[in-house]
Amino acid sequence: MRAMALFRVLVLFLTLSCLVQIKGQGVGINYGQIANNLPSPSRVAVLLRSLNITRVKLYDADPNVLFSFSNSQVDFMIGLGNEFLQNMSKDPTKAQTWIQQRLQPHISKTRITSIVVGNEIFKTNDHVLIENLLPAMKAVYSALVNLGLEEQVTVTSAHSLDILQTSYPPSSGSFKEEFIQFLKPLLDFHSQIKSPFLINAYPFFAYKDSPKEIPLEYVLFEPNQGMVDPNTNLHYDNMLFAQVDALYSAIKTLGHTDVDVRISETGWPSKGDENEIGASPENAALYNGNLLRLIQQRKGTPAKQSVPIDVYVFALFNENLKPGPTSERNYGLFYPDGKPVYNVGLQGYLPDIIYTSNAATTKILNLWRGVMGLAVAGLIFDMDVKMRMR
Ligand SMILES: *[C@@H]1O[C@H](CO)[C@@H](O)[C@H](O)[C@H]1NC(C)=O
Ligand SMILES: *[C@@H]1O[C@H](CO)[C@@H](O)[C@H](O)[C@H]1NC(C)=O
């Protein structure tokens, strides 16, 4: 049995080495798991390796995933769910316990670079959550300091773009009045601990609401006239860059030019309900394909040309259990079987074998990795449910 498994693993290495690989330089991906049909994390580790994707955002500190990516070259941003904020704000030792229990067991082997405290908190309009966001972030930061991890792991939070009151023209970007009292100290904290401000930005939402007014080419990064910001004379030929610069302007109104903006989610659905105009595989391929090219060119936005956009694409897989309109379940670049939903030049490899976790095999595989000069990372183990269910 074991010899057979080993043989198959070796075949896998040979297959991997023959693949044409596409540079995924600088691309991050959201690894959402609201589904019941996704491949095991160790198989996903192989897929991402074959895609050359080295930055992943996870929505929680899933120990299976973190274990499966040990000794890989992948940097993780780890979400800390909204449900924890109140407790951590009230009792900062809970933040420390969470880090000790959920992150520390992995941190020597798996590269954890960031904790994303809360997701789209302001969009909930839940005042308890909104008031507890910053105290929870501070609790997490203090815990990292106590544990000597604050240089290695940054603390941030991800926001939806509708924290903005005005986003057009970009130079007039401003925050919603009712959030300013919370955003001002939040930005002061970002500035103090030198961490980026994360935004989930979806030009798709704007387009589907106003398909008659907004040119499709402008939201899909296709050639178009674009628009000139009358205050700055800067030319914008795509909506995503305009949205990011609007956020920079809003941040500036609160006194900060020292906080970087990063895009923690953006994407385009390949399918939607009848009223979700624009959701199609063709448009999703254009959006994500053009975006990947801009990332590879290390493009900055017109107002911040020297800062290459930093993007986590949403999402790795279609997630069949996501509630809401059809589009919600169709943002993935890949089907759960590893096949691309559409062609953006990302041809990955999802192995169909399950590895066993065992010191002897690991040793031999490491030897083989050396012999073949393949930096195939962290793909040997599978503590997968599938294995246990057999
Ligand atoms: C993977 O990306 C790195 C840059 O991040 C690049 O140097 C390398 O050549 C890429 N490898 C392949 C096989 O595409
Ligand atoms: C928050 O604390 C309460 C009381 O200790 C506990 O019952 C609850 O499970 C905690 N919530 C979370 C998400 O940990």
Image (tube, helix red, strand yellow):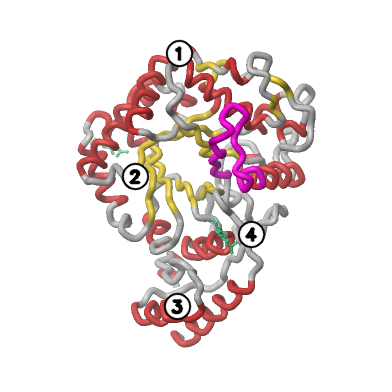
Query: Does label 1 or label 3 sit earlier along the sequence?
Result: 1
Residue that mark 3 sits on: 370
Identified by mark 3, the residue type is Gly
- Spatial separation of the CA atoms under disc 2 and disc 3: 30 Å
> Residue 54 placed where, x, y %?
50, 55
In terms of secondary structure, where does tag 2 sit?
Answer: loop
Residue that mark 4 sits on: 22
Tell me the residue at 54%/76% (across/down): 13
Q: Quadrant of ligand 1?
A: bottom right
- Spatial separation of the CA atoms under disc 4 and disc 2: 29 Å
Magenta span: 293-313
Q: Residues within 10 Å of mark 4 (few under 14, many from 20)?
A: some
Residue that mark 2 sits on: 153
Query: Does label 2 or label 1 sit earlier along the sequence?
Result: 2
Left of 95 or right of it: where is 164? right
Labelled disc at residue 178: 1
Query: Does label 1 or label 4 sit earlier along the sequence?
Result: 4
